[in-house]
Amino acid sequence: MLDAGFEDFSQIALTTDDRSASDTLRMGATDYNVRRAMEAGLPPEIAIQCVTINPARHMRLTPWVGSLAPGRFADVVLLSDVAALDIAEVWADGQCVAQNGRYIAPVPAIAWPAWASQTINITRELVAEDFAIPADPGRQTMQAAVLRPFHWADDFLVETLPVQDGQVQRDTSQCITKFAVVDRYSGQGRVGRMFWRGCGPSTPDTAVGCSVAHDQHNIWVVGSSDAAMAQVVNQIRRQQGGWALVRDNTVLATVRYEVGGLMTARPAEALDADMQELYAQARTIEWMHEPTYSKNWPEGFPERLCFATLTCSPWRWVLVAPNPSVPEGFVNVQTGQTHPIVW
């Protein structure tokens, strides 16, 4: 915006959408965005305006917050170094709640009701057969619809895959593995499964999955064996949400999201400790990788698969949990068209 000559930032706000607790602890939240804006050349007073008075005005909260004035709530951030945006203290409602980067106010204990903490409604143990993709009788190969993370093309990929023991198989030589979305709401545990390219583990008998799956937040799982995929989903079901990483019939790491299967009520530091263990175990796995439409698709642990099941533009063909209108779960969300996953 600065390079383009943009001058009026009065209607601009900076957001921290989907920044994890680990990244927030490492980089910061809104303060990180302000520092980046200043590094790009925005004057400090304008950058700070973009996270204070601007959003307050947009949300029509200016009678209460957004400025130091009589009658406003005393929400104040005190800086020890403006250029570095070094936050010395934070005051909320006239009370000091943080000093030198540490929250010091009491943390309220919330008794989360069952409807918020028991949200993985899968009433049975999943087995490897739930993730099998049967082949037509007598076939040695099958054509398969294939997606990849952030596949925004009008059409899906089509690849020829081998058949063994009556089932269509993965093909690591083509960087193709199996991806699934499991219904966690109805109690039926319906599984949509197909083949994906350029993501997931190439290490044998390994799978990873999570109950954060924008935007429907069913459970997604990607794996090099059907049994490992089933074990991941069963572990997430037992812990009522979060991450699970499995290899050789062993659960290597888990992270609990006990609120809605999406969040934790534990301190950010506790969540980060669990995530760091997940990252450490993930570094022992060999992960498939191919470039895709999104430049934000890094090599290694495929954490951003949490965003790969979105059903909004620019997505076209996606995998969702099966339902009566989409029996196999493979659908073009812009047209409603469905297609077999193998033929």
Image (tube, rainbow, N blue to C red):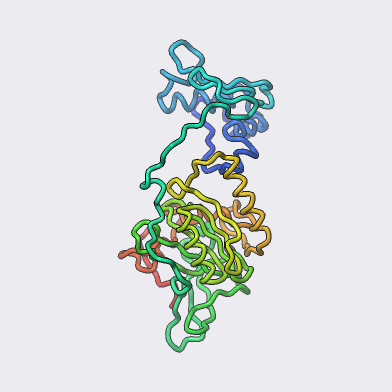
36 w.r.t. 53: above or below: below
Q: Looking at this view, is 70 or 280 the one in front?
A: 280
Based on the displayed image, in which of its 4 quarters is residue 247 positioned?
Answer: bottom right
289 w.r.t. 264: above or below: below
Q: Which residue is at a point 62% across and 64% down the rendered structure image?
A: 288
Quadrant location of the C terminus in the rendered image? bottom left
x then y, percent, for residue 342: 45, 75
Q: Which residue is at a point 69% across and 27% down the rendered structure image?
A: 84
User: Can see residue 274?
Assistant: yes
Q: Looking at this view, is 52 or 42 the one in front?
A: 52
Quadrant location of the N terminus in the rendered image? top right
Does residue 337 appear to the left or right of 53 in the view shown?
Answer: left
x then y, percent, for residue 80: 67, 20
Residue at the limit of the structure toward the left, as seen here: 324
x then y, percent, for residue 219: 46, 58
Residue at the limit of the structure toward the top, as seen here: 70
User: Can see residue 314?
Assistant: no
